[in-house]
Image: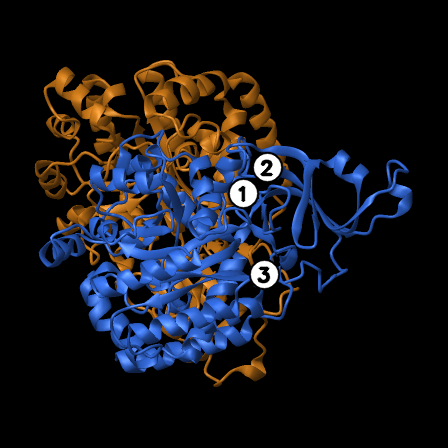
Chain colours: A blue, B orange
Amino acid sequence: MGGRFRHYPRASGTLRRKHPSTRKNHQPMEQVDLVIRARWIVPVEPRGVTLEDHAVAVRDGRIVALAPTGDIEARFSAIRTVDRPHHILLPGLVNAHTHAAMTLFRGMADDIRLEDWLSQHIWPAEGRWASPDFVRDGTNLAIIEMLRGGTTCFQDMYFFPDVVARTAIERHIRAVAGMIVIDMPTAWAADPDEYFSKGIAVHDQYLGHPLVSTTFAPHAPYTISDATFERLRVLADELDTPIHIHLHETRDEIRTAAQNHGHRPLQRLAALGLATPLLTAVHMTQVTPEDIALLAECGASVVHCPESNLKLASGFCPVAELLAAGINVALGTDGAGSNNDLDMFGEMRMAALLGKGIAGNAAAVTAEEALAMATINGARAVGLGDEIGSLVPGKLADLVCVDINEPATQPVHHPISSLVYSACRDQVSDVWVGGHAVLEARRFIDGDTTGIFKRAAAWQRRLAETNA
Amino acid sequence: MGGRFRHYPRASGTLRRKHPSTRKNHQPMEQVDLVIRARWIVPVEPRGVTLEDHAVAVRDGRIVALAPTGDIEARFSAIRTVDRPHHILLPGLVNAHTHAAMTLFRGMADDIRLEDWLSQHIWPAEGRWASPDFVRDGTNLAIIEMLRGGTTCFQDMYFFPDVVARTAIERHIRAVAGMIVIDMPTAWAADPDEYFSKGIAVHDQYLGHPLVSTTFAPHAPYTISDATFERLRVLADELDTPIHIHLHETRDEIRTAAQNHGHRPLQRLAALGLATPLLTAVHMTQVTPEDIALLAECGASVVHCPESNLKLASGFCPVAELLAAGINVALGTDGAGSNNDLDMFGEMRMAALLGKGIAGNAAAVTAEEALAMATINGARAVGLGDEIGSLVPGKLADLVCVDINEPATQPVHHPISSLVYSACRDQVSDVWVGGHAVLEARRFIDGDTTGIFKRAAAWQRRLAETNA
């Protein structure tokens, strides 16, 4: 990744080079790559803080300092300085659960029951079409959607994680590629042996890569045998790699598990030794007090996917109760087939609003909590809590500016409220991943999106013909 | 309004004048003001229909024809033709319940219980600041937010409806100004007599106005006496004017009503003769089967405000059940103090998603139903069902284009799904109200927003000082 800028567009009036004559003193200054000054900075850590008249200095892809603008200007000489006078600067958002390639299914099958959605639409389409090309084209579309909307890191669960990793690197987004495991043959692998060996090959290939890491991604308790889970536990411990799994998504899942295993799925995982801080339970719409106690005790994370849970009528995740128990709750969009977008601003707002409705308490799931869920909690869930998710010196410079100078975000009483309750994804103006600028003044720096849209349209026609 | 264009910006490449040489035949052609050709047209009536390669012809502010593009071009000669090649054209959205001026309270007091929100923040701020200037500045901000996001008509409930009406006309949005009634003195009126006389003066002043109409806006059952309701019934019948009222918003309201009146509030209104097709019940989060039967029988409308209901943890409106009973359900944002935006795209998506979650049925509240709620159902609720809400020849040309050529709305399997589940308010590219263009290529045609933002910021400082 290197954190060095490959592009220095000069057209924008917001860029300027610092000349020696503008320096405030004559002390030797530290050279940095980038200084960003924004009207407000929300570092996420410490929680609830909003800084005014501050700036961030970036060198070699990492945050060097966050301090009052005067101090930053006195201390650093920047190759590039960016002024964002009516913007909020915040950490890039972390989409802790998605199936990126499923953007190609966006809007293909809505307003139908989950079982019909899966059995009559998604599974047949995947059986016929899931291929490296499909995953590349769908993931490309997902990535430009996510970057455009301020998401700088996503955790994926899909076939061909090698293609996901390669595509993420090409487009310069941070990806946590899921080593998918499922006890049935697919285009990616024929049996558990092959899932594990191909997954671990991806893990090994990207070990230490600045943009890509890997986690285990067993599909769900009802598609994974005890033997496969046991193998997974040994490997996850050995590689110290998180495991994310669809868990307690629907009432049916709980009922079937009770019939087949005599346990709730979370209890079964615990019995198999998988209830550890490496576990990330995605969905958790069916939750008892015992489930909460177990999650809290073992230090697992939960990924809440509120829009998908509503759209598929799966149930309600009791977010306020999970947070009160000290559980790390992150946010995910799930795939665009059941959402139908990858908009983490939408998901933040939904988490805060729905969390209050479900708790019956307007003080539950505050804007600050929702923002933490979409940033630092997501970073922790995907194993990158020390690297991203907050604006702390030493962390990677995954940064987002949101332009607040729009009718829906005026006036500004509290910037964090503006971000969570009023801003929309299209107000994201600038995005840096590891200090590398990918979006500037609402435009992609690298290339255009026409080719990606054309390929998506071609898939739409192909899918429509098959579905017809 | 006049339906005539006051502006003919010439810079855009999408505009062109039709020259005689481009005509397809030599029949005498009908002259119209405007032809809009869009990739897709969603007329809302008939329900669920999407037209391709169609165009709309507009004359004197009304829709003259909606037909295949070739037919429109053969029949009409347009002063102006607008091409929108990757857009969806749909009726302007109808925000059936808001308190426009409360945009100035946006984000002032979040994440607190309803009773504290009202008694410690909103009521003191209104008591101190509500004035014609406050209402003008807040309503101006609300209007540019609504137009920017594709809302062409709003029904308002606030003090100084005369200022609301005047501001709406200045900015060329369609307004249904609420003649507010509340059994307590405010800056607008001292007692029921004054509320009625000032309200009816506004009604009379704008009778027959092309942009402004009026409805009665009694605040809520717990702030209105039986005597005031009786007077309201007589006046509403006499003027044939709809009545919209906050109804069954919270459990507390129901409990208090049972203690004070021995009835649920809806039953009390029925006993007072107010349960008629003129009634619009806003919120209805506390609903029994008897309530549903009564609403259906009397032909009243409901305005669902899902984001506000969640944010204040008021309860859940059973939208799927109301629709199944044949009740006309419209959508409203409520005020920006409890939302915190006036985004009807957000409200449509929320209605469809939350409606499924609450019904426990992924097939409930379809995209088509949510779109109808935000357009034709809203038009009917505010008494304008024959004039707006669908693209039918003879109706007013309140039109919106949404640019679908963005990552989050590609590919397009079903355009109505794209509108409801994937599009965001900022993708609205063009807005016409009564055939008059107010937004073009995402920019306001008349003036800029700087002055409105500055006045909003000044109110924010004033409010922060008082609140501190």
Name the foreground residue: B72 vs B68.
B68
Q: Split into 4 quadrants, where in the image is the C terminus of chain A?
A: bottom left
Q: CA distance from mark 1 to mark 3?
A: 38 Å
Q: Split into 4 quadrants, where in the image is the N terminus of chain A?
A: bottom right
Q: Which mark is residue B452?
A: 2
Question: Measured from the top left, where is residue A23 in percent x and y?
Answer: 87, 40
Q: Residues within 10 Å of mark 2 (few under 14, many from 20)?
A: many
Q: Which mark is residue A210?
A: 3
**Pair 1/2: label in front:** 1
Residue type, mark 3 in image: Pro
Q: Which residue occupies 88% across, 36% down?
A: A25
> Relative to B419, is B231 above or below?
above
Q: Given the image, what chain letter belongs to the residue carrying mark 2?
A: B
Residue type, mark 1 in image: Pro
Name the foreground residue: B391 vs B102.
B102
Task: State the SS at label 1.
Answer: helix
Q: Is residue B314 left or right of residue A43?
A: left
Residue identified by numbered label 1: A407
Residue type, mark 2 in image: Ile
Q: Residues within 10 Å of mark 3 (few under 14, many from 20)?
A: some
Q: Given the image, what chain letter belongs to the residue carrying mark 1?
A: A
Question: Measured from the top left, where is residue B285 in percent x and y?
Answer: 22, 36
Task: State the SS at label 3.
Answer: loop
* Residues indicated by labels 2 and 3 sit on the same polypeptide chain: no
> Relative to B44, is A319 above or below?
above
**Pair 1/3: label in front:** 3
Is residue B90 in view from this perspective? no
Q: Given the image, what chain letter belongs to the residue carrying mark 3?
A: A
Q: Is residue B17 left or right of residue B245?
A: right
Name the foreground residue: A21 vs A280.
A280
Q: Which residue occupies 31% across, 69% down?
A: A108
